Amino acid sequence: MQVGLFIPCYVDQLFPRVGMATVELLERCGCTVEFPQAQTCCGQPMANTGCTNEARPLAERFLEIFAPYQYVVAPSGSCVAMVRHHYDEYLEGKPGFAELKAKTFELCEFLVDVVGLKAVDVRFPHRVGLHQSCHGLRELRLGSSSELVGASFGKAQQLLNLVDGLQLTTLKRPDECCGFGGTFAVAEEAVSCMMGEDRVFDHEQAGTEVLTANDMSCLMHMQGIIRRDKKPIRVMHIAEILAGDRV
């Protein structure tokens, strides 16, 4: 399988290990991974603040760069949700756009639905708390939401259950927003911080040693709160855990 790897801006600039772990995982699954260096931001920050004219050329550039690949994979639910659910405003009717939406996947989604990953040779003997990011949960349907009636499922949880020694903690509010929300954290700083503190407290009472998610943006927000409050919780992207990184 040929994969065009899309790395979110904040991962590229602040958490490059997440990108490397993603490559390691995909290559172990037999994928040929390419990182097109011409890639730019997906345009989500601009789109979220109503800057349509600024977001449009980024969407067009994304289509141009990633159209040739068999699959497009990103270690981020929010960026993938931008492509699959919010690029229509900019790219509707353009050649290759329908195909781009169909072949763009969040990392956990790709490993479960396309690769069909059933085993990982990794040991991680820690109590792990899983944060379900809003975009992945409610736009990509990577897990079941508490407000919906139906069978319970979670693609990230399914992958973490493959890891030897890993114990998932039980949260009181398993699909609560962390409060980041991109530019929301800037426009509504106080509310954002309070929501993040609630999320961290839920993990703390559950006995979480390592807090993970498939969106580094959410983890970045909560990591800041954990550091300021001097909490003994470590933060790792799910790709790092599945790739065999240690705390």
Image (cartoon, helix red, strand yellow):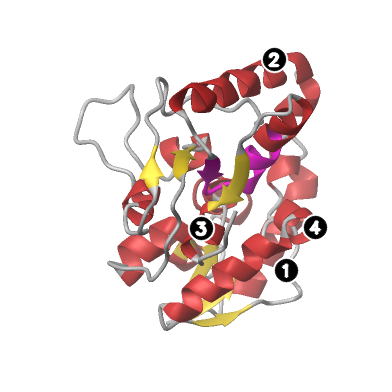
Q: Is residue 195 left or right of residue 172?
A: right
Label 1 environment density (alpha carbons within 10 Å; few <14, some 14–19, many ≥20)? some
Secondary structure, mark 2, is helix
Residue designated by label 3: 241
Q: 234 or 178: which is nearer to us?
A: 234
Which is closer to the viewer, label 3 or label 4? 3
User: Which residue in the protein does label 1 denote?
Assistant: 39
| 56 inside magenta stretch | no
Kind of residue indicated by mark 3: Ile
Q: Work out whether residue 75 or residue 236 is closer to the camera in this orientation and state it.
A: 236
* Label 3, label 2: how far apart the Cα atoms are: 30 Å
Q: Nearer the viewer, mark 4 or mark 1?
A: 4
Q: Which residue is mark 2?
A: 191
Q: Which residues are magenta?
A: 210-221
**Gap between marks 3 and 1, in whole Å?**
26 Å
Residue type, numbered disc 4: Gln
Nearest the viewer among 78 and 209 is 209
Q: Amino acid at mark 1?
A: Gln
Q: Secondary structure at mark 1?
A: loop
